[in-house]
Image: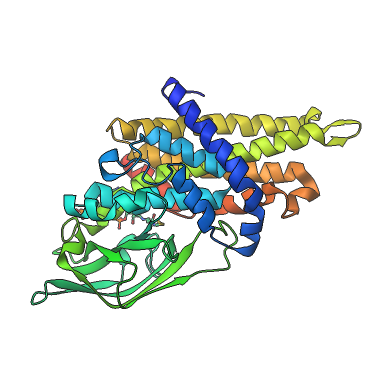
């Protein structure tokens, strides 16, 4: 490991534990779940038992009290074996629990967070809409206040929301327009919406090329009523809550990219040492050896960047630029390693029963989800003062 701060006994033990779990429990089921596009309740429960829910939440709210580096390593080890299960954990921790923990008041934290730290409950992040993706301020979902009843009525829809359409989903943090700002832009606020709220319809989305065993939902809000105490943060703070949550989420996606890249390298190296052409293992041909060398070098650089970003975050230093860089670079390295790995596997790399094929598909999401590569470049360039 490149950084001594990531090389402690505790972190090594955590890595070994999550790796052993992912290889033993997830690996053997990943092909079938991907094929059937099935979210596994059983594996989700087991990931809960392992302590992968509520990772960075302090133990006072029922969480595991891990630091960010530990969390990143846990996500990385899951993604090394399977993107879908890493996605369930990454989305739940950073996008689900994150806003409740960082922006919830004491009562909200005590009410909602403990059951989300066990694997028995999931929470989703309701930002994206059909017409509001990269332009996240363009939400059309509206919330109207009724002073007589001291409640908000939410109408609209959300799309591509991870973990939102399972029977474990306890609620969603929803960004909605609550008025107009003096500069003419929409005033955006966030609401805690329980998944059983009357008027809320949650529908599983199918037909994804990647992360096929992770749950993705479409949400429809037909006059959904929530009491005023369900506002998260203050009126008009919604967009900042969403943006800060995405800053943290970028560390998770970086971890997924790094893990996927490492998984692709491990698979490719093992195959290249086994498979023979022209009388020798293909790893002995420079055409293949150089690919492996390039993959390993890019992985080392990605790891350094991601761990630095996580270290900055956990030490309360500005980390947002590094998080965007880590998300951008790790997702590119993941795609590179999956593609070069697939090339090395030749025809076998095109067959579904070879995990490298799944890595190749799963990598595609990383440059699109939680802010496209273009958005990361926009964010980084703004930090440079462009
Ligand atoms: N943290 C806190 N506040 C932030 C912020 C951040 N990271 N980024 C922006 N803001 C604030 C700004 O300070 C500004 O505040 P004021 O209204 O008080 O001036 C406000 O938010 C609007 O900022 P800005 O004008 O920069 O917003 P833009 O509409 O230009 O959008 C981008 C900024 C493009 C970066 C944002 O829309 C974005 O991240 N889009 C991608 C969304 C995304 O990742 N979606 C995928 C979700 S998958 S889970």
The one nearer the camera, 275 or 226, is: 226
Q: Is residue 170 visible?
A: yes
**Horizontal and vertical percent position of residue 238:** 23, 58
Where is residue 209? Give x, y as percent: 60, 61
Q: Nearer the viewer, residue 147 or 55?
A: 55
> Front-most of 28 and 213?
28
Q: Residue at x 65, y 61 (%)?
A: 35
- In screen coordinates, is 272 left or right of 114? right
Q: Is residue 124 left or right of residue 318?
A: right
Residue 5 point in image, percent of width and height: 41, 23
Q: Is residue 171 above or below residue 286?
A: below
The mark tally for this picture is: 0
Question: Farthest residue toward the top?
Answer: 4
Which of the image's four quarters has the C terminus?
top left
* Residue at the outermost left position: 148
x and y, in percent, of residue 381 in the image: 37, 43
Q: How is the image coloured?
A: rainbow
Q: Could you tell me which residue is drawn at 91 percent across and 31 percent down?
A: 279
Question: From the viewer's perspective, is 255 left or right of 337?
Answer: left
- The residue furthest right is 279
Q: Is residue 301 above or below residue 132?
A: above
Residue 366 seen in the figure: no
126 relative to 293 in the view: left or right? left
User: Which residue is located at x 55 percent, y 29 percent?
Assistant: 300
Q: Residue at x 30, y 77 (%)?
A: 198
The answer to which image quadrant residue 4 occupies is top left
């Amino acid at each position: 490991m490149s950084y001594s701060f990531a090389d402690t006994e505790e972190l090594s033990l955590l890595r070994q534990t999550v790796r052993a779990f992912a290889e033993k429990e997830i690996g053997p089921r990943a092909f079938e779940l991907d094929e059937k596009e099935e979210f596994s309740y059983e594996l989700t429960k087991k990931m809960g038992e392992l302590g992968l829910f509520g990772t960075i939440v302090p133990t006072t709210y029922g969480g595991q009290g891990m630091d960010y580096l530990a969390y990143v390593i846990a996500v990385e080890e899951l993604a090394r074996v399977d993107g879908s299960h890493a996605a369930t954990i990454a989305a739940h921790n950073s996008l689900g629990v994150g806003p409740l923990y960082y922006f919830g008041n004491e009562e909200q934290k005590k009410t909602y967070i403990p059951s989300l730290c066990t694997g028995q409950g999931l929470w989703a992040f309701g930002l994206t809409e059909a017409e509001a993706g990269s332009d996240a301020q363009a939400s059309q979902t509206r919330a109207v206040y009724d002073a007589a009843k001291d409640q908000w009525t939410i109408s609209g829809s959300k799309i591509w929301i991870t973990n939102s359409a399972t029977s474990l989903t306890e609620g969603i943090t929803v960004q909605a327009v609550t008025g107009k700002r003096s500069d003419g832009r929409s005033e955006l606020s966030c609401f805690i919406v329980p998944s059983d709220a009357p008027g809320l319809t949650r529908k599983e989305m199918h037909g994804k090329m990647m992360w096929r065993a992770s749950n993705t939902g479409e949400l429809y809000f037909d006059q959904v009523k929530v009491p005023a105490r369900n506002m998260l943060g203050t009126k008009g703070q919604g967009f900042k809550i969403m943006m800060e949550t995405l800053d943290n989420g970028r560390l998770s996606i970086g971890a997924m990219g790094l893990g996927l890249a490492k998984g692709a390298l491990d698979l490719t190296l093992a195959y290249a040492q086994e498979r023979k052409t022209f009388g020798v293992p293909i790893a002995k041909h420079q055409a293949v050896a150089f690919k492996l060398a390039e993959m390993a070098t890019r992985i080392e650089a990605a790891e350094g960047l991601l761990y630095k970003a996580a270290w900055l975050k956990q030490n309360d230093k500005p980390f947002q630029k590094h998080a965007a860089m880590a998300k951008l670079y790790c997702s590119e390295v993941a795609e590179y390693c999956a593609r070069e790995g697939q090339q090395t596997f030749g025809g076998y790399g095109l067959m579904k029963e070879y995990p490298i094929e799944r890595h190749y598909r799963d990598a595609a999401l990383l440059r699109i989800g939680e802010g496209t590569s273009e958005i990361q470049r926009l964010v980084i360039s703004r930090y440079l003062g462009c």
